[in-house]
């Protein structure tokens, strides 16, 4: 009675097996390459994502009894656009990743045409390169031969979940859920259905899009001839941030979480209501039950947090791995005036400036790598505070994701926001949420109350520090944010 959960993230694929008591029994992981064809462009090979999925799954299967598996849950990086041939399942071009900024001019053009208010009304989103719709518009305008095959019905369009389900079912199923669909700029948020008006606005043929299915329930069967001999129902699917909200058991209105991954994402459950924000937050679908009931959330999307640490490792090569950043940062009492705004792919909530770029200020002859590492971790905490400042009062913040294992960062976060930070025993709540959805869909768990009983606290970080000094450091950082804006415009 265990669940196989696949978390197809931005830099790699994690496969886990979750037991009925909510414990991760085994894990496999496979990183895949990032492609940067031009400044501001980010692409992934769909085939490399699929091969990483197979490798991560193959690894986890060696550690468990396969006969005990009852279902598959899938969660994924959102907004990334994948095209594939419906017959061969090959992809004619690399996927355009959510971090990609190439459509900034299209967004500016549509904004100048007066489209943004209507788009925001229908979708709960804004015109930003982050979302899928303008990526598809760009493809139509810049790769007409490829797009002609989308319009003829030969090529399917989807997000990463749709692509993986197509691969796992040998092309039989082309489906997605509302948590992914609502990030495309093509879904009517109130109705939870594809919008003909939006498809026309962005120039996307409705027939190329996947069918919409509930977030849990038996969605599609895997084909053992292509998926490692496994014949299991795919019974849960959700975009990564909504999956983490589910994995953190934030089932009640007002419950919130922050996931520290490639970016950081703060979601607050708003129940059955679409809540609109005047402060740069997104209104989004959280999940839809098999009976059709929609649950919504408010989201603060921060594009680069963990990716900034990855940049320290791979770009600057001043750290060997992410885990050592806490120890390095702790060797200095402060950043000695260094401030880092990690706008490496523009700024998300609450600023929304695709033309912003990463900015490091305050460097002197005395600046060391420890100052820069500490400034990076502080920058992450500042970005999250930026979003939380716009939300209703919270008593605690539940955190998850890889960087949540960093005690130094969690304490920084608690100090900056002045609220307790709670870290669960399982920080891989994105994968856990996919397992919870699939288990709920196949009867492993009977209700969300059963799921809530599996949540366990690892550590609670209480806020401390000198409030005036903390606020002053945050104010200096917000000044640096203003200086980062519009750089690539």
Image: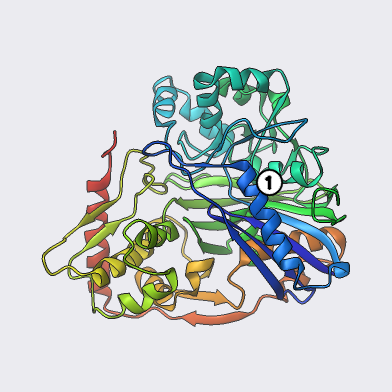
Instruction: Residue 229: name its quadrant.
Output: bottom right
Q: Residue at x 40, y 32 (%)?
A: 104
The residue pinned by badge 1 equals: 161
Image position, residue 478 (x, y; %) = 26, 55
Q: Residue at x 72, y 67 (%)?
A: 60
Q: Is residue 142 above or below residue 176?
A: above
171 left or right, relative to 356: right
Whether residue 249 can be seen here = no
Image quarter in which the N terminus is found: bottom right
Image position, residue 448 (x, y; %) = 76, 66
284 left or right, relative to 221: left
Using the image as rendered, state which of residue 436 and residue 351 is in the foreground: 436
Image quarter in which the C terminus is found: top left
Q: Is residue 209 above or below residue 140?
A: below
**Residue neighbourhood size for the residue with mark 1, other residues' Cα within 10 Å, grouped as few (<14), some (14–19), many (≥20):** many
Whether residue 316 can be seen here = yes
């Amino acid at each position: 009675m265990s669940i196989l959960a696949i978390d197809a993230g931005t830099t790699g694929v994690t496969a886990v097996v979750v037991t009925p008591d909510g414990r991760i029994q085994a894990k496999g992981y496979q990183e895949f390459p990032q492609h940067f064809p031009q400044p501001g462009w980010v692409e992934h090979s769909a085939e490399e994502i699929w091969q990483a999925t197979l490798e991560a799954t193959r690894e986890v299967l060696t550690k468990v009894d396969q006969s005990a598996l009852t279902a598959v849950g899938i969660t994924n990086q959102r907004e990334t656009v994948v095209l594939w041939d419906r017959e061969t399942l090959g992809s004619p071009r690399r996927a355009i990743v959510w971090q990609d900024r190439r459509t900034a001019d299209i967004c500016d053009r549509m904004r100048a045409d007066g489209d943004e208010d209507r788009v925001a009304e229908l979708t709960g989103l804004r015109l930003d390169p982050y979302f899928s719709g303008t990526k598809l518009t760009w493809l139509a305008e810049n790769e007409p031969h490829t797009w002609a095959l989308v319009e003829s019905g030969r090529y399917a369009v989807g997000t990463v979940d749709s692509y993986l389900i197509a691969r796992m079912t040998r092309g039989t199923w082309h489906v997605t859920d509302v948590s992914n669909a609502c990030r495309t700029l093509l879904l009517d948020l109130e109705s939870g259905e594809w919008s003909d008006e939006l498809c026309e606005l962005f120039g996307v043929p409705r027939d190329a899009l996947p069918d919409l299915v509930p977030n849990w329930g038996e969605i599609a069967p895997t084909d053992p001839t292509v998926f490692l001999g496994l014949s299991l129902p795919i019974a849960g699917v959700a975009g990564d941030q909504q999956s983490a909200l589910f994995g953190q058991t934030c089932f009640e209105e007002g419950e919130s979480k922050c996931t520290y991954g490639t970016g950081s994402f703060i979601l607050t459950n708003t129940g059955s209501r679409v809540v609109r924000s005047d402060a740069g937050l997104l209104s989004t679908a959280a999940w839809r039950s098999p009976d059709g009931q929609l649950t919504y959330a408010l989201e603060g999307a921060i594009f680069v947090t963990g990716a900034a640490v990855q940049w320290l490792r791979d770009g600057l090569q001043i750290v060997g791995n992410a885990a050592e950043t806490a120890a390095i940062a702790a060797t200095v009492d402060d950043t000695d005036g260094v401030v880092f705004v990690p706008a490496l792919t523009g700024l998300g909530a609450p600023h929304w400036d695709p033309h912003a770029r990463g900015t490091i200020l305050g460097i002197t002859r005395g600046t060391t790598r420890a100052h820069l590492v500490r400034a990076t971790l502080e920058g992450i905490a500042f970005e999250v505070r930026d979003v939380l400042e716009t939300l209703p009062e919270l008593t605690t913040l539940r955190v998850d994701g890889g960087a949540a294992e960093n005690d130094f960062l969690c304490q920084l976060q608690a100090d900056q926001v002045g609220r307790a930070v709670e870290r669960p025993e399982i920080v891989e709540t994105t994968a856990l949420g996919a397992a919870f959805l699939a288990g709920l869909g196949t009867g492993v768990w009977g209700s969300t109350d059963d799921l809530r009983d599996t949540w366990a606290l690892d550590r609670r970080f209480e806020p401390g520090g000198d409030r005036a000094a903390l606020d002053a450091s945050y104010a200096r950082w917000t000044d640096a944010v203003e200086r980062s804006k519009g750089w690539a415009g």
